[in-house]
Amino acid sequence: MKFLKPLIYLFLGLILLFALPSCDKQATAKVETTIERKADFEYIQKEILTTTCAVSGCHSSSSDGSYAQHKLILKEGQAWDNLINKAPQNANAKSGGLKLVEPGKSDMSLLYHKITCELGHHSSLGNLGASMPMGGQVLSKGQVEFIKKWIDAGASKTTAVLDVNLLKDLTPCQAALQPLAIPAIGSGFQLGIAPFDIPKNSEREVFLRLNTPNTDTAFINRIQMRGGNNSHHFVVYSFRNSVQVPATNTLRDLRNLNTGIINPGTLIEMQNHIFMGGGTDVNSDITLPEGVAIKLAPSTPLDLNAHYFNRTNLTLTGQNFINFYTVAKNTVRYQAKTLDLNNFDINIPANKKTTFSKTFTFNEITNVVMLTSHFHKLGEKFIIKIFGGSRNGEIIYTNTDWEHPLVVSFPNAIVLKPGEGLTSEVTYNNTSSIPVSFGFTSQDEMNIIFGYYY
C-alpha cells in the first residue's frame, strides 16, 4: 500500500496537469466568442452603411454633391447620432410623422422605408424618394430584415440581441415595379415601357416610340409617371417633325450595350425631340392649372425615354408607366406649350464649386404656369429668376434636390412680355479630381429648365 500511494498521487497529478490547459482553453474560447459578437449596430455600420451608403457622392461627408438634398452623413462615428429621432428632409415623410429612425417603430422610420423591397408598404405616405442604395449594391433580404429588427428592438447603439445569422440571407432585396392603375375609360390612357434588363455595372438609356391611342383630339391636363429603382430620369417627348420619326414599338439604346459608345442614329433622333413631361423624378404627378391643357392630335407619335444606372454585380430591371388624363374641350381656355431651355455651356473644374448663369428671352407674350429643373448629382442649387420688366431678378424657383426636383405650378401665370424671359442660375460642387461638363450619363452634368406656358 505504501508503494501504491506515490503512484496514485503521481497519476492524479498528471490528470490535473493535462486537465488544466483544457479548462484554460475552454475559458479562452468563451471570452473570444463574447468578443467576436459585436453590437447589432456595429454589424449594420460595418457591413451595410460603410460599404453601401457612406461612399463618396452619397452619405460620406458634407462635401458630397447630394448632401444638400438629404443632409445625412452615415460614416462610422456619426451615423447613429445622425439617424436616431432625427427629422427627415423629405417633405412627405416629415408630414407623415416619420423620423429617420424612430426606436421601436420601423414603420415610422424613413431608413426602413428607403431600403425595403416590400411592395406598396408606404404608398399612403406618398413619394418618399428613390429606394436606397441608389445605383449601388442592392441590399440583401437578410440585411433589410436585420435593420428592421434592430429598429423594432429599440435601435440601440450598444446591445447585441439579434440573430446575426439573418445576415447570411444574401437574396437580393429587389421589388417588381407596382404598375400605375390605368385611367378609367373616357378619362385618359396609359403608355409604358415593358420590363428590360440593365446589365451589371452599367448605365442604360432607352427610347421607345409609341402612338397615343386617342382617335379624336385630346386635351391633357394631368401627367402621372412611375419608374423603377435606380432610375435617373423618365421623360416623354413629342417630335418637331412628325414624319421623320423612329419605328414604333422598338426599344432603342442611346449607347451600344457592348461598347458603351453612343449610337449616332439615336443621337440624331434626339435632336427632333420636344419636351412634353417628366424629369429626374420618375414618380412625378403634374397637374396643370384649371383651364390649361396640352392638345394632342389623334395617334400622336411620342418618344418615351428612360435612363437607369446599375452599380451592382446583378442584372437589374427597368420598367416605366405614364398616364395621360384628359379634360373636356369646352373646359380648356388655353393650350399649354412646353419649355425646354438648355444651357450646354457648362464646364465644372475639378475640386471646385462653380455657378453658371444663362438667360432665355421670348419674342411673344408668354404665360408661365409650371416650372421644374434637371441637373445631375453635382448640382447643389438650381435657381430660376425673372429677366426684365418690373419683376426683374425676382427668384421664382429654387431646387436643391437633383434626384427629386421641385415642380412649381403657378395658378396665376407669370406673364412675360416680348424681350423678357427667364434666367437659370445653377451651382455645382465638383468634389471629384476631374473636370465635368455637359453630357448624357449620370457622371456628366446638365442644366435644363422644363415647364409649361401658354
Image: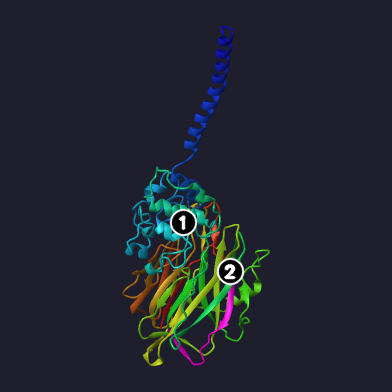
Kind of residue sitting beneath label 1 = Gly
* Nearest the eye: 258 or 178: 178
Q: Residue furthest front?
A: 1
Query: Is 250 covered by the magenta stretch?
Result: no
Which residues fall within the magenta stretch? Answer: 205-220
Q: Which residue is mark 1?
A: 65
Q: Secondary structure at mark 2?
A: strand
12, above or below 377, in the image: above
Q: Position of residue 144 (x, y in %)?
A: 47, 56
Q: Position of residue 50 (x, y in %)?
A: 49, 48
Q: Earlier in the sequence, mark 2 or mark 1?
A: 1
* Nearest the eye: 220 or 127: 127
Q: Position of residue 62 (x, y in %)?
A: 42, 51
* Label 2 Cα crowd, 10 Å radius (few <14 / some 14-19 / many 20+): many
230, above or below 34, in the image: below
The residue depicted at 60 percent of the width and 70 percent of the height is 196
Q: Which residue is mark 2?
A: 205
